[in-house]
Amino acid sequence: MTPAVTVIVPGYDVAAYAVEALDSLRAQTRTDWVAVLVDDASNDDTGKLFEAAAVTDQRFQVVHHREQRGLGAARNTGLDLVRTPFVGFLDADDRLTPRALELLVGTVDASGSDFALGAYVRLRPDSAGGYEAGSVQPWVAAATDPARVGATLADHPDASGNIVAWSKVSRVDLWRRTGLRFPVGKAYEDQVVAQHMYTRARAFDVIPDVVVEWRERADGSSITQHKSALPVLRDYLEALSGGIEVLDAAGEQRAAASRVRLIAGMDLPALVDIARDHPEPLYRRELGAFARTLAARADAAALPDSARIALAAAALW
């Protein structure tokens, strides 16, 4: 069987979760896939688990980085090895739902669109020491429900709220003809790339089904759980601002406005809560500068009370 899609699976010190990620690939209802497993110089058994998977299933190919280069570089390593018409991503601590590739590849293959995006849920620690999948959050549903074929940002600007690499399958041609790559050495490296995908694609498809379960690690080691660190905050704000700038440059003002509303309503309040008691004054100053820029773009009448309060508080720093 000729493979249709390559799934790029980067991993760094994720031995505790990698088996579940790989099992979720093996459980796919669509079986014409291959996977590039990129071990980003892990210190634990991640690389050994990847190698063991490749021994028992020839669909797995393993690459080892000699030194840690980060998630963006690991994804780029995988992109260089893709030989299939379609490509997707799965972080090695997350899980695909069984029909993910069937739905994502199937709709793009049938429609001729450049990529498809699907819904996702969080995997959160439960009281028994395991993980439990949550429900689809409102901002995810706004981007992925209802189903659409051949959409653009002009008719579906809220799609821009789906900014994660691993909820999508795309034509490799989109990456080749646009020269898209992931930023290296940055956290939140997929946010700007996602906006480039929306603005450069001829069309995209939308799937309301959950395709990925995204893990919030119990030990707090996920990068999204480190927003109190000043370097992470800087990467986060750079990614948020950069995504809006991409939309603006492409003339997608409705999508840019949608991103501003979502960031002000969801991202900013949580950061303000962190900043209030943060020991580093520079954290508040940098967040305040970002908030003032965001406030200048925001339509206050369209914002929820929590967003207006957060903007007002952060703008004073």
Image (tube, grey):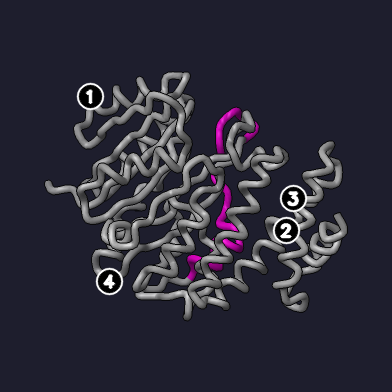
Q: Residue at x 68, y 56 (%)?
A: 267
What is the span of residues highlighted in magenta in the rendered image? Answer: 126-145
Q: Earlier in the sequence, mark 3 or mark 2?
A: 3
Q: Height in image: 106 above or below 6? A: below
Mark 4–mark 2 Cα distance, whole angstroms, equals 39 Å
- Residue type marked 4: Ser
Numbered disc 2: secondary structure? helix
Callout 3–callout 2 Cβ contact below 8 Å: no
Disc nearest the viewer among 4 and 3 = 3
- Residue type marked 2: Phe
Numbered disc 4: secondary structure? helix
Q: Earlier in the sequence, mark 1 or mark 2?
A: 1
Mark 4–mark 3 Cα distance, whole angstroms, equals 40 Å
Q: Which residue is mark 2?
A: 290
Q: Earlier in the sequence, mark 4 or mark 3?
A: 4
In this view, the residue in front, 234 or 298, is 234
Q: Which mark is residue 55?
A: 1
Residue 64 can be seen in this image = yes
Q: Height in image: 157 above or below 268? A: below
Mark 3–mark 2 Cα distance, whole angstroms, equals 11 Å
Residue 179, position as x, y percentages in the image: 34, 57
